[in-house]
Amino acid sequence: MIAHPCFRVEPWALHETNLHLDLLAQTESLFALANGHLGLRGNLDEGEPHGLPGSYLDGVYELRPVRYAEPQYGSPEAGQTLVNVTDGKIVRLLVDDEPFDVRYGELLSHDRLLDLRAGTLTRTVQWRSPARRTVRVVSTRLVSFTQRAIAAVVYEVEPLDGPADVVVQSELVANEPLPAASGDPRAGGAAGASFVGEGHWTQGARAVLVHRTRQSGLRVAAAMDHEVAGTPRMWTSAEASEDSARFMVTDVLAPGQKLRLVKFLAYGWSETRSVPALDDQVVAALEAARGSGWDGLRAEQRAYLDDFWSRADVELRGDPELQQAIRFALFHVLQAAARAEQRGIPAKGLTGTGYDGHSFWDTETFILPVLTYTVPEAAADALAWRRSILGAAEQRAREFGLAGAAFPWRTIHGEECSGYWPAGTAAFHVNADIADAVIRFVDVTGDREFERTVGLDILVATARLWRSLGHHDLQGHFRIDGVTGPDEYSAIADNNVYTNLMARRNLVEAAAACERHQERARALGVTPEEMAGWRAAGERMFLPFDARLGVHPQAEGFTDHEAWDFASTRPDQYPLMFHFPYFDLYRKQVVKQPDLVLAMQLCPDEFTPEQKARNFDYYERITVRDSSLAACTEAVLAAEVGEPRLALDYAAEAALMDLEDLERNARDGLHIASLAGAWIALVNGFGGLRDHGRTLSFAPRLPEGIASLTFSILHRGVCLKVEVNERAAIYRVTRGSGEVRVLHHGEPIVLSGAAPVERAIPDLPTRPPSVQPPGRAPARRSPGSTRE
Amino acid sequence: MIAHPCFRVEPWALHETNLHLDLLAQTESLFALANGHLGLRGNLDEGEPHGLPGSYLDGVYELRPVRYAEPQYGSPEAGQTLVNVTDGKIVRLLVDDEPFDVRYGELLSHDRLLDLRAGTLTRTVQWRSPARRTVRVVSTRLVSFTQRAIAAVVYEVEPLDGPADVVVQSELVANEPLPAASGDPRAGGAAGASFVGEGHWTQGARAVLVHRTRQSGLRVAAAMDHEVAGTPRMWTSAEASEDSARFMVTDVLAPGQKLRLVKFLAYGWSETRSVPALDDQVVAALEAARGSGWDGLRAEQRAYLDDFWSRADVELRGDPELQQAIRFALFHVLQAAARAEQRGIPAKGLTGTGYDGHSFWDTETFILPVLTYTVPEAAADALAWRRSILGAAEQRAREFGLAGAAFPWRTIHGEECSGYWPAGTAAFHVNADIADAVIRFVDVTGDREFERTVGLDILVATARLWRSLGHHDLQGHFRIDGVTGPDEYSAIADNNVYTNLMARRNLVEAAAACERHQERARALGVTPEEMAGWRAAGERMFLPFDARLGVHPQAEGFTDHEAWDFASTRPDQYPLMFHFPYFDLYRKQVVKQPDLVLAMQLCPDEFTPEQKARNFDYYERITVRDSSLAACTEAVLAAEVGEPRLALDYAAEAALMDLEDLERNARDGLHIASLAGAWIALVNGFGGLRDHGRTLSFAPRLPEGIASLTFSILHRGVCLKVEVNERAAIYRVTRGSGEVRVLHHGEPIVLSGAAPVERAIPDLPTRPPSVQPPGRAPARRSPGSTRE
């Protein structure tokens, strides 16, 4: 999409210079503003036209019954769906007697700019009404990182070619009509019209609407307050009814005169608090926001982001488009997570209702690594959310006759919402992924108190799950049969290598953590015998290997399966899942997204370099990347095995997933995990960052076309900045103090203070390029492909 | 249920001497009458009370939308459900001013007798009305085997203790209200109130109702005509409306006087014929039936059944209850199939709406072997039905990217109706099961013309399926990966031994049949190259064997899976599928129904005697028989490996499945395949019949408690009668002429003419008894357990 001529490549902004209604749904996702708690899609101020109106509160869901053709024990009976809450973004305008609507009259110019440093979305419009009055409208919107309940809009209107009577209507609208579902199973079905009104009030320029979700019984309050500046003739009024509140400003403007409205929006929700309590909560939040004022909110926003970028920015010279994309990606990852505060991070963040607003393993495997190194408090919060749903996960494990906890494949509130268990509940690896995120977080931050209070509960519950899910066979191997690994084109297989390796880490590290926190471990009922059982299972974990081919089968028997007939598969038959039955996909050698290759990224020490190279070659030939979670992992391994050019292609695919709408569903929300994957592709790929060893290690090497790459990570209280150019890498500590020991291409180096350490990058051994299925190679990234 | 004191053990009848309303739904199934085309549940004449009212026409279904929690490519969008058609069984009675209803007044006696030789259900009731008038009501019902559109009822009422005004109302009722669905997923959801009226007429004592199913667009006509005999004061009237027709007879009877009504019922249905054509059809059928009259219909019925029993009866001395059960079983198998005439045989026959009235692999694997040897024309018709739905099966294969035909796992009209593909479409063995039935039919009947005209199309289409479903691996083995075998507690496994062996037979026999019918084969596009490919795949079929344990894994890897924890499984947790997720069942060693053991029955030459014994032992320990399709197969193999006592227990379980309501769902209809399995248990088990070799073979041996067993089979135009006693077997030809060569415990014998050949039964080698999971051994059959 960014290739569309209406978009400009700018280093710190997403900038659309022209409005294209056919791109509206996608741009609403791209221009979404959020802080992890509250998200507003980039809908036009006046509400219509829209692709999908969307205002979301993290954790506010509605229940809907799930129907099965053939009901089974253990299948969830209710699904959870992210709710489009009361829409407070709307500011409508009447010019003389014509409503401002871009579809009517004449749109002279339309410009939208998402400023990644300011954290604001600014829209500048010149519009000539059907009655030929020209006005300029400038609006700027923010969702505050510093005041999590608050969003604000400043809206200015000015006639350009003669006097105009203007009416500005600032609104709260509940139960907005939503467009019909698309039929794409990934899209999710946003719950519309499920809000039950519980109260509506106005007071001066302030209005409050309180609603309750019909089935899930969550109470939501939305409030707005206003500051206006116009001519002496200006007057205002306010009114409210069950599903709508309106604040109206009427003025008569001459050219040169402006009407300016500042709208403060506050949201609050609760499972338990009463209507008056929620009313108080949002009104208090509004008062605080008015105290800051628009300028104050904006300054706080800028300061918050300045701090973020100072430790998280990734600079990349040689590819301006990729530079823009990685910053766009990091901004949206931050928006998805910053203030989620012990609620889940949905796969689409708060940018749309794709995947029903559910959180998956994406959070721990793709998003949390980035947050752990850049916004660790957000990573801690996300893991604390997992800790908070442990009860539901333990209940689920009991239903399955298993010990410990079985975290849901997809959920908002903690209960399993997957209606197709072979690709849902059977993907037990999510439990090891959560444990892995805990282990990484503790390792990177050194936060033993987090480990004791949050981490240990998760590690113990998941280790217990694995111990009961697997079994020792006659040879003493520990087998985990009949589960589904990351690749969704396989299911219910024995001894998936990824799952077994991650389960091994889970088992072994849980025992180690219990050693460190013996009192808490005892409180959880962990005995030395139990820990010994975990260690034994981990040590004897079965890892299939196909000696004939010299590669690891993704799961036992995989390499015996029939090859997918790529030659007969037409380009329009991708993604394969929409054109072939799972029956066929599961039984053949075709991979949707890295599975064994992801194991090689996350458990690098379990494979020899030769195995990595052979495995990568083998799986590249059969991986079709029908998932947005594919490219970043392939980038990392391509870089490791010595294919930097291919790695760059994959990195670009991950980074441009939504900007170029590669999956054709950016309309439903952004792929937050793929955006996080852009960071992973660059930092773990070209930076060669690997963790989970005793020492943090780097193996930086740039692809042709990238002149330099600079990134920072937080590690045990220091900020470590790594600058990579074509010949060398320079390591320095930019914040904090103390010695930091890392590996550079295997060579130990010690950093202390701010003194940079420079090391040459070893020569690249050449290897024949790997091969992808016909038509499934990533788009070739070349300097020529970039526009400025 | 037969253990209930209201049931008597009689050799040729099912006899209930007392009405128990809590058994009503089950007895409606047990007392159902059908001829394969038309089925009437054993509802009381007066319609109420009822468990489930049911009148069914084989092939008359309604469509209903199927919903999925997560839609997938290839999942059926519509289900087919057997329709409760216009109810013509109803004859209501008013005695003075009180309606005859067994729930009111006083039921002095109530007796129902299903006569297995007469093919009639007779009910004799003495009832005292709330107003204290006592009447005797005697009704006899039949569904004609000789006039397939016809059922008839003779209904007599007689006051016993004083004069009575009586009104008899004979009805046709469409869109009967049905009880709510039970929630048991096996029960099916009969389509209620889906009939759209298209016409209703009366003419004298005759009435016709024509309806159309709303979604599937099938037209159904039901008609009734009557003959009445009463006092001179008797008068009659008739009326009809859209959903109901009534013929009323009014009389005043003194004690000793009877009112007698003969009701003739005719049904017809069509996908294409018009309302007048169907009206004509049913009226013509009624005229023919009236021509025969009640006595004529009854005589024809008796003659038909005499002929059937003369070639199909199984006599069994020593266990009267089992004697009754096997005849009851054969009668219902006949009722399910006799006049189906190129429509499917549903799993429940026409006795209820269980499994939605669908046909499964049950038909070919359990029902057709019995029919092939006893009513071969019905077997031919059932296979002709499969031939008739080949188009839909070819379409399904194309959807899956496969060659040939993929027959549906469950269907009425030919389209796949399974909403859970791992246990539906993935159970591709149904295709080999159909082919196997063709091969057996041709082998047993010698009917090469059937093979050429019907069989070859099926054999070629299924061989093509297997060739495209499997593949040769690097070692040249032919593998069939990711399919589901007969055992529904495993799914999507590689190289299921049953499937691979049956596919091998399919491939090899298809090639052989094409050799025999070269012209037809050419017309089907079969080339010598293609046939060579089938033979090669068959010859190199991969059959996993676990050398460590000396047993065949049911599928590759099965014996490495975790053992099911039987010790912790409570008795109330069976059937396991209602208390454990499929996830758990699939990945552990627990077997719902014989899979590898069925392979040993159907492909006996593929296993050595030692392998059979070891395999049987191994699988007995883990088979829980949560399927009604389990016991008969276990009986056969128990008998073969030398456990006749266990075989008897299993045979009794198969035979008593519905009479004792062992699966607790006889209310939804009878388990026709299990009833057929009773024959299989006796004939293939204690008779030791095996086919598919060059020579038909027997290995008869009786269990303790059975003094003798006599059965007959039709084989290439002769009827072969086998009488087995404790010491010897006597073979004789009772119909037809020519030499018959068979094996007796491996010894070739030649039968010609009627001269009996007697051979001694070799001694039984002793072996330790096999072990079943705790609590899952079949009920011990002992002479003491039988009542007379």
Image (tube, coloured by chain):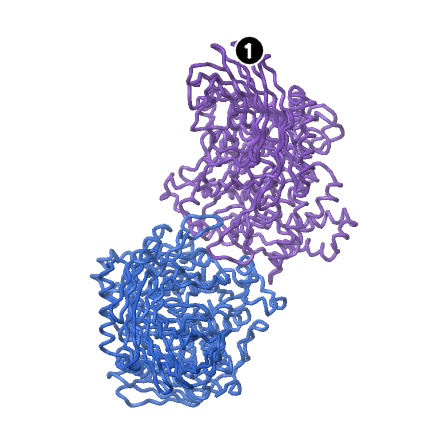
Chain colours: A blue, B purple
Give the image location of residue B409, x and y in percent: 57, 47
Q: Is residue B188 above or below residue B14?
A: below
Q: Residues within 10 Å of mark 1 (few under 14, many from 20)?
A: some
| Residue B341 relative to residue A260: left or right | right
How many numbered discs?
A: 1
| Residue A228 relative to residue A469: left or right | left
Is residue A499 at least partly visible in the picture? yes
Q: Is residue B623 above or below residue B107?
A: below
Name the residue tied to disc 1.
B257
- Which residue is depicted at the point 42% across and 22% down? B104
Q: Nearer the viewer, residue B720 or B385?
A: B385
Q: Is residue B230 above or below residue B635?
A: above
The residue under label 1 is which amino acid type? Gln
User: Quarter of the image holding residue A753?
Assistant: bottom left
Q: Nearer the viewer, residue A226 or B515?
A: A226
Q: Nearer the viewer, residue A625 or B618?
A: A625
Is residue A742 at least partly visible in the picture? no
As drawn, which residue projects farthest toward the left?
A519
As drawn, which residue projects farthest toward the right?
B519
The chain containing the residue under callout 1 comes to: B
Give the image location of residue B216, x and y in percent: 60, 45
Give the image location of residue A412, x and y in percent: 36, 61
Q: Secondary structure at mark 1?
A: loop
Give the image location of residue B142, x and y in percent: 60, 25
